[in-house]
Image: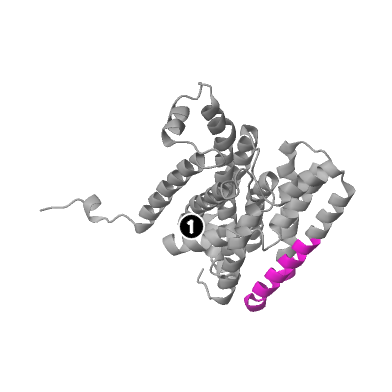
Amino acid sequence: MILSHGADRAVSPKVFWLFGLTMLLLCTAVVSLAVGSVPLAAGSIAQSLAHPNISGFTHAVVWDIRLPRLAIAACIGAGLGVAGAMLQALFRNPLVDPYVTGVSAGAAVAATLAIALGVSFALVPAAAFAGGLACAVIVTLVSAGDRASANLRLVLCGIAISSLCAALVTIVLLRSGSSDSLTILGWLAGGIGGRGWGDVTLTAAYVTVGFLAALLLVRPLNVLRLGADAAAGFGLHVGRARFAVLSAAALVAAACVAVSGIVGFVGLMVPHAARRLVGGDTAWLLPASALGGAIVVMAADAFARTVVAPGELPLGVLLAFVGVPFFLIIARRPVEL
């Protein structure tokens, strides 16, 4: 019997993992739409989704409250997962993510200042991008050196920058009115309640641009994983590549911070889990991290608004309870990037 080449060629396990993550994402989305202070039956949700023009209580809950919130959670999770995967590959450091490196803190300072000054929400992500990129560049320059000590300096510089940014945010809060201060404090705790379709469109646009930029940087990221000297030997302009990766990661992280406040550790945890499934090749790691991040944030948001219903836990607070122990475990274990 003569077999075709297609029959002989086995499908990569990585494809199955991406398919499995996609199915898990859809299941998480269904559960997220169903749970909350007002539980909804699957049949009611399906009818509302199939007939978007009908009116009623279930339709309002699904289309005006939970579906925009679900989309925001997916965008934030995917963005933070991709940003974390990019930064870990760039710095060759398993402890790196937008939160640890100070990118999120810098974006938060700029976004807080923009909100306090009454800047249009459409411009808040741009301000956050500038703040996040500035902090990323500072941390990168200060921590540069041999790899053995650079990893430690990177984390320490990120902590220092985050502390400075926290102090600056406090100053902005003290100078703001009471209503602005309460708004900013609630936003900084991390949360996506009350977001509408306009927020979804804006966030999705920034995250999509950043993700497309990340896909264009797959080859430089794979080469940078070998080290600066090896990357230069392959003909890569290391300085330009690093700045491009930093800019893409800062853009994605800043868009997430602008809409949800500081949601830490997603960019740390998700790439580690994705790397175990699909390996370190960024061509596979980026989509796996995007799917995994979306799943984590969607599930965390569903839990946050259900466990203390009719109230809700801040999303950033909930993820910190999970992320900090994970960070401590990773810090004690060698991880192959």
Residue pictured at 63% horizontal, 47% vertical: 312
In this view, the residue in front, 177 or 205, is: 177
Q: Is residue 334 above or below residue 291?
A: below
**Nearer the observer, 288 or 306:** 306
Q: Is residue 312 left or right of residue 123?
A: left
Q: Specify whether 171 is left or right of 139.
A: right
Say if 230 sits above or below 200 in the image: below
Specify whether residue 236 is in view: no
Q: Is 103 on the left-hand or right-hand side of 7? A: right
Residue drawn at x 61%, y 43% as measured from the top left:
310
Residue 161 magenta-highlighted: yes
| Residue 180 image point, x, y percent | 82, 43
The chief SS type of the magenta part is helix
Question: Which amino acid lies under the numbered mark 1 shown in the image of this protein?
Answer: Leu
Residue 327 in picture, x, y percent from top left: 60, 68
Quadrant of the image occupied by residue 246? bottom right
The answer to whether residue 61 shows anywhere in this view is: yes
Of residues 241 and 78, which is closer to you in this image? 78
Outermost residue to the top: 54
Vertical position of residue 334 compared to residue 64: above or below: below
| Left or right relative to 300: residue 261 | right
At a point 61% along the width and 56% down the height, the residue shown is: 318
Near mark 1 (Cα within 10 A), the count class, few <14, some 14-19 or many ≥20, is many
Mark 1 secondary-structure assignment: helix
Residue 215 colored in magenta in the image: no
- The residue pinned by badge 1 equals 285
- The total number of labels drawn is 1
Give the magenta part as a residue range. Answer: 141-164
- Where residue 141 sits: x, y (%)? 73, 66
Residue sitting nearer the eye, 165 or 29: 29
Q: Residue furthest right?
A: 175
